[in-house]
Image: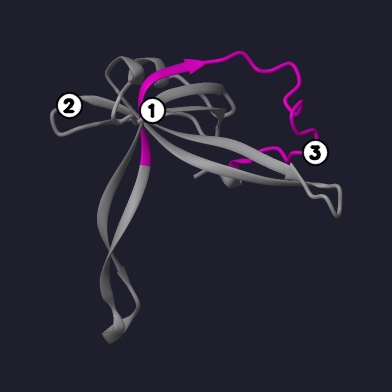
Amino acid sequence: MALYENHVTLKGYLGKSAESFATRNQNTFVVLSLATKSGYRDKQSNEWVNRTEWHRIVAFGKPADHAKNLKKGDYVEIEGELRSTEFDAEVGEGKKKTTVKRRGWEIRASIVKKLTQPASQGAENPDADPITEDDAA
C-alpha cells in the first residue's frame, strides 16, 4: 500500500481546441480546458442543480502527442496528478495596492484518451445544460 498517492482521473468535454506551446528548450507541451459536470436533484423544487468545473490540463511528451489534435467538444479521459503553482498577484488600487500569494491548480497528464461520444449525453442528468464556448476556462 502506498503511503502517498496523487492520482486523478477525469472524463469530460473540451471547452476549446488543444493549444500547443514550446518551452525555452523547445520541448512541446499541450494545454487543454476540460469541463466536468456534477449535479443533484433539489428535493423541494424537484429540478436539477448543476455545477460545471473547469480543469486546466497540461501534457508533455507522449501524452502531448495524443492531445495536440483534440478539438473543442471532444469527449476525453485524462489521467494524471494534481499540481499546484504559487504566484504573486497585485490586488487593490493606488496606495492600497498590495501583492498577495495566489495558488493555481492544474492536472499534469500522464494519459490522454479520446473517447467515443456517449449515445445519450444526458443519461445521468437529463436536465443538464449543455456546455458552451462562453463557459470555457
Relative to residue 127, is residue 1 drawn left or right? left
Can residue 114 be found in the magenta stretch? yes
Task: Give the structural element (helix, strand or loop) at label 2.
Answer: loop
Neighbours of disc 1 within 10 Å: few (<14), some (14-19), many (20+): few
Q: Which residue is mark 3?
A: 127
Q: Which residue is mark 1?
A: 7
Which residue in the rendered view is the most extreme toward the bottom? 95
Name the image quarter holding residue 112: top left
- Cα–Cα gap, marks 2 and 1: 28 Å
The boundaries of the magenta stretch are: 106-133
Task: Give the structural element (helix, strand or loop) at label 3.
Answer: loop
At a point 31% along the width and 59% down the height, the residue shown is 102
Image depth: mark 2 or mark 1 in front: 1
| Dot 3 or dot 1, earlier in sequence | 1
* Amino acid on which the number 2 mark rests in the picture: Gln
- Cα–Cα gap, marks 3 and 1: 30 Å
Task: Give the structural element (helix, strand or loop) at label 1.
Answer: loop
User: Residue 14 location in percent, x, y?
Assistant: 54, 31
Image depth: mark 3 or mark 1 in front: 1
User: Residue 37 location in percent, x, y?
Assistant: 62, 38
Identify the main secondary structure in magenta: loop
* Amino acid on which the number 3 mark rests in the picture: Asp
Name the image quarter holding residue 19: top left
- Cα–Cα gap, marks 2 and 3: 45 Å
Q: Which residue is mark 2?
A: 26
| Dot 2 or dot 3, earlier in sequence | 2
